[in-house]
Amino acid sequence: MNTHWTIESIHRQEQTVHLIHRETAIRREFSIPGALHAWMKDDLLWVETSHGYLWCVTPLTGHRRRQRLSLADHQDSLGSLSGSAVL
């Protein structure tokens, strides 16, 4: 599915991920502690962190969920980083 959001940047020191909506130019900034990699899938922002968590953020509403990554999850997520932003 095509996403309307694009990752503009990831700032490790500020611990933020910046997005822009391609059609409306709306910008969003999300604080994600320890952000390492980020990618968009089905209009959701996915962020892998150095703390062993995977965050799922809905850019439009700001709703977020976090889950602990297992080693197998970590390897799967790294294998699917096509079109992702990496620090």
Image (spheres, rainbow, N blue to C red):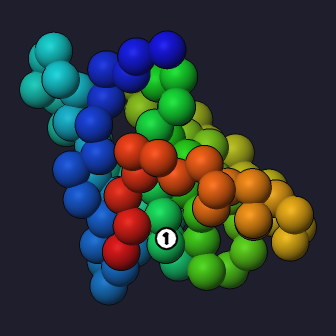
| Picture layout, residue 33 above or below residue 47 | below
Q: Which residue is drawn at 31% across and 65% down?
A: 10
How far across and how far down the image is residue 6, in percent?
27, 37
Please indicate, yes or no, whether residue 58 appears anywhere in the rendered image: no
In this orientation, which residue lies closer to the viewer: 74 or 32?
74
Q: Give the amino acid at mark 1.
A: Ala
Q: Position of residue 13 (x, y in %)?
A: 32, 85
Placement of the C terminus among the 4 image quadrants:
bottom left
Instruction: Left or right? Give the position of 9 relative to 84.
Output: left
Image side of residue 62 versus residue 15, left or right:
right
Residue located farthest toward the bottom when viewing the structure as drawn: 13
Q: Element at badge 1?
A: strand
Residue 1 sits above or below residue 66 on the image: above
Q: Position of residue 9 (x, y in %)?
A: 24, 59
Question: Circle 1: is it few (<14), some (14-19), or many (20+) Cα within 10 Å?
Answer: many
> Mark 1 — residue?
35
Residue name at image x 27 percent, y 52 percent: 18
Residue at the image position 70 percent from the left and 45 percent from the top: 65
Visible residue check, residue 5: yes
Where residue 2 sits in the image (x, y, percent)? 40, 16
The one of 33 and 4 positioned closer to us in this rendering: 4
